[in-house]
Image (cartoon, rainbow, N blue to C red):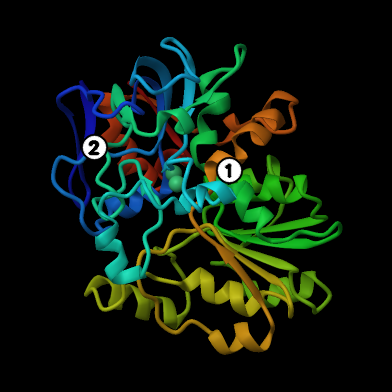
Amino acid sequence: MKAVCWHGANDVRVETVPDPKIINPRDAIIKITSTAICGSDLHIYNGYIPTMEKGDILGHEFMGEVVELGSSVKNVKVGDRVVVPFTISCGNCFFCNQDLWSLCDNSNPNAWMVEKQMGYSPSGLFGYSHLFGGYAGGQAQYARVPFADVGLFKIPDGLTDEQVLFLTDVFPTGYMAAENCDIKTGDTVAVWGCGPVGQFAIKSAYLLGAERVIAIDRIPERLEMAKTYGKAEVLNYEEIDVGEALKEMTGGRGPDACIDAVGMEAHGTDLMSFYDQAKQAVRLETDRPTALRQVIVSCRKGGHVSIPGVYGGFIDKVPMGAAMNKGLTFKMGQTHVHKYLQPLLEHIQNGKIDPTFIISHRLPIEEAPHGYEIFKHKKDNCTKVVLKP
Ligand SMILES: [Zn+2]
Ligand SMILES: [Zn+2]
């Protein structure tokens, strides 16, 4: 089959590799009909995620048709159309039983590697390094899905791939980010980062009762999308002082909740962000927390900080004094995708949200390297690339 393989920083290649096989009774093989490139794939593309190996198949946002099932998978049939959550979960452990799917105890065979750094390992992830299980990803013609009896979600007839593809990650991730803000009716929510997750966080904040959403980015097309589709008020951080603007817009009090939908490769205009770029470049700091610092300082006293943006390791100069003394509540984590599939599918079916608005490019899988390039550099108004195997 054809697959998008990683070969180093800024080097992905479409190669012919062996088809996946059933190796466990709870496996399924999916013939992929649509797959997307995610902002978190760019952290791998840029070379910031350790334990990638040459030839690893990328991709964790994919859907398709069931073509083969292990003997224990009874809840779907060959021929069903399914979406696949990016987190891999067993469905039986302490964490899965509490709806904390991305913290599954049984799906990362390389948990020992993560435990050295993090104490305990979260779940395995598709196409996201050997640290998170070394699973082949879904930017390919076929994929093996482990724990398929809990990891496949059947799509009802009448919905297109593009309407449901983002249930695999960015829609639930944006939704959970908004949910983590504990929004009360009338709240003001500020969202840093207007990529796909930020866009879905904006939409979701309104769905959950926010009165105002303020979106922050520097890319004009993304700010325009936040304004047009998300109905957010927008701030370009290259043009104004975000902290001052937020203070002014909220009567001097600050937003009730702030979302960091940027993560470890933030850009900034202040001295501190150049410090981060320099330290990250020589590997003295793994992540650049420019957005996170602003989030903490800008949030109102007693407010909520929600972090869907990916961090991988260690960050410097986090204003912990501000966080503690202002009594902030922090919520974060990889998304518990399985928990959100049914409710968010219903939002799509009843027309409350049409996730297709974020798609800017549809490419055959052979053009994946071009897709990564334009998405990384935000060329050609690129907001989201869907690949067709
Ligand atoms: Zn993703
Ligand atoms: Zn589990």
Q: Residue placed at 24% from the left, 37% from the top?
A: 57
Q: Residue placed at 47% from the left, 72% from the top?
A: 290
Nearer to us in this view, 137 or 190: 137
Residue type at numbered disc 2: Ile
Residue underneath mark 1 = 172
Q: Residue placed at 36% from the left, 70% from the top?
A: 119
For the C terminus, the quadrant is top left
Crowd rating for badge 2 (residues with CA inside 10 Å; few <14, some 14–19, many 20+): many
For the N terminus, the quadrant is top left
Nearer to us in this view, 69 or 3: 69
Q: Position of residue 155 (x, y in %)?
A: 56, 20
Crowd rating for badge 1 (residues with CA inside 10 Å; few <14, some 14–19, many 20+): many
Q: Residue placed at 44% from the left, 65% from the top?
A: 266
Q: Which mark is residue 57?
A: 2
Nearer to us in this view, 263 or 75: 75
Q: Is residue 201 left or right of residue 248?
A: left
Q: Is residue 90 left or right of residue 53?
A: right
Q: Is residue 270 above or below residue 287?
A: below
